[in-house]
Amino acid sequence: MDTLAALGPYYTAVARWVFVFLAIFILIKSIKSLLQAKNPSEIWAYIGGPDGSSTPLKHWENVIGRASSADIVVNLNSVSRNHGTLVRDARGNWRYNDLQSKNGSYINGVRVKKSMPLKPGDVLTLGGANFTLIPVSLREKEENIQKRKQKSRPVSPWTSLIALTIFQLLTIIQFKVALGEDCPPSVPTSIVGLCAVMWIYFLVLRSFQRVAFEMETIAFFLSTLSLALTAVHTGNVMKQLICIILGVALFFLLCWFLRDLTRSKQIRMLILGVAVLLLLATLMFGTVHGGAKNWIEFAGMSIQPAELVKIAFIIAGAATLDELYERGNLTIFMIFSAFCMGCLALMSDFGTAAIFFVTFLVIAFLRSGDFSKLILIVGGVALAGMLVLSLKPHVRARFGTWGHVWDDPMGTGYQQTRAMSAISSGGLPGVGAGNGWFHTTAASDTDLVFGLLSEEWGLIIAILAIACIVTLGIFAVRSILAGRSAYYSIAACAATSLFIFQTVLNVFGSVDLLPFTGVTFPFISSGGTSMIVSWGLLAFLKAADTRQNASFAVQLDDRHKGGIAS
């Protein structure tokens, strides 16, 4: 031990740069694979037109009409701009629904009054023109799959996994060096446990012929940093590991849940009911932390129900193409959104309320595409925000401190000025895990975690952590064009907008570029509920990944060699 203590400073001096290079290698490979990923559109069937042409159906949900934005454009004045929708389910069955068109729709001469099945060979009549559904042949299907495999092949994950494993093992040594005999056994045990969970996950998925693991590699890397920061600040590192395991389990559960859109829609109201009960329970039985009544404590444990409601909020907001044209469905989401933000306002949890609001705007725009209504909503919420500032003294105090933390560095600006000082003292490579001083500041591992991360792991790794979240968002937006269903596209974009905005509030709030709102950094901040929900939200992105054999949230047909997407 004396030898280890003597060599400690030399090890840290070298290791902190090794950590930087390993992090750059791990994340550049994952980020490059995600950004270079091509999501070639899948061809599910063809629609034969009256002129003998055939249009490929590249989505499960297709609008047929005269509008240029329609998936299947019919240049006939007798056809409405949005005449109807042609929708496929996970079992391969197609249904047609008329959108109150001016001349109606007919299947084999029978007027479509409600959603009706459309089988191969059936005649669909729109505005006097006849169309026919043509299935894709097995040979063409297999050829398309081979093309998709070639175009969407991700980077091999093994080198990234090995590099991340080395990163984790070096982290254990770093804590042994930094803390010496004071290093509790729970620190190496938890990091080894995370490493084991990571390898079991990858090996199990590889046994099912899955090939893309960039998102999970990013999440495991950020979770490793979370364990390291939790070990420094609270010592609750085993609890954090358990929450990571629970998060991975939730990730699996939600991916299974999202495999079947019918199941997702059927259980939606139940999830909304549970979310309502969670928020009401928080209002009635919650405890106050940091000025916000957003915690429930029982049996020696504490949770933040509002974090769990984030998943329900996205499930409620995502919608299939047919539902986009149903006002009732949108009304339910509007009421649920107002209820959530109203409850959060009563709890004085305005940071989370802001995150919900931005996510609501993203979902509302993706569902309607109407900027004018969103401007009115933003204006109304701005007025409500001004009212809150006049009624809530602690919120007004935070806004009053914004931009002036150095005016009172030992008072109202104490936390943020210390965070900025820690970021400065860490420099590019950091001072080494366990060697910093900022962990003695309240909330350094949660709301101010960017300061702790920058101090001990360096500004380079801290910026890479932000880049990880941004990359997930870019991938989600790019996946829209090849999305099977509007449900998956809306859910993925909503989840990443939540990730990005929450990260912005955490990072910019720490350095006084935005008001300090007290929200966590996804995957990194200490806190069980936040970690579990971060992994849960990742499932929405995984479900939107349509690359061949990339996502276990996408069903495969095992009857065909190579795993043909169903």
Image: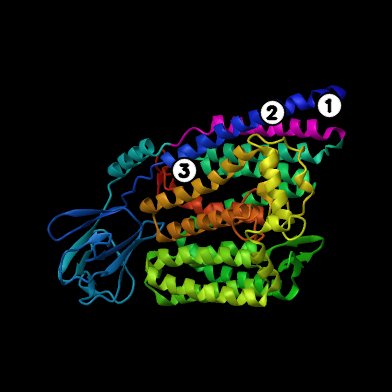
Q: Which residue is mark 2?
A: 15
Q: Nearer the viewer, mark 1 or mark 3?
A: 1
Q: Earlier in the sequence, mark 2 or mark 3?
A: 2
Q: Position of residue 395 (x, y in %)?
A: 67, 69
Using the numbered discs, state the Cα–Cα distance from disc 1 to disc 2 in whole angstroms: 15 Å
Q: Position of residue 186 (x, y in %)?
A: 80, 41
Q: Position of residue 213 (x, y in %)?
A: 52, 40
What residue range appears in magenta?
154-181
Query: Could you tell me the amino acid type at mark 1?
Result: Ala
Q: Is residue 323 toward the left or the right of residue 266 in the image?
A: left
Q: Which residue is mark 3?
A: 550
User: How packed is label 1: few (under 14 Cα within 10 Å), some, or many (20 or more)?
Assistant: some
Q: Residue at 79% x, 48% y: name it.
A: 440
The residue positioned farthest toward the front in the image shown: 407
**Local SS, label 2:** helix
Q: Is residue 467 magenta?
A: no
- Please state, as top left, top right, bottom left or bottom right, where the N terminus lies in the image: top right
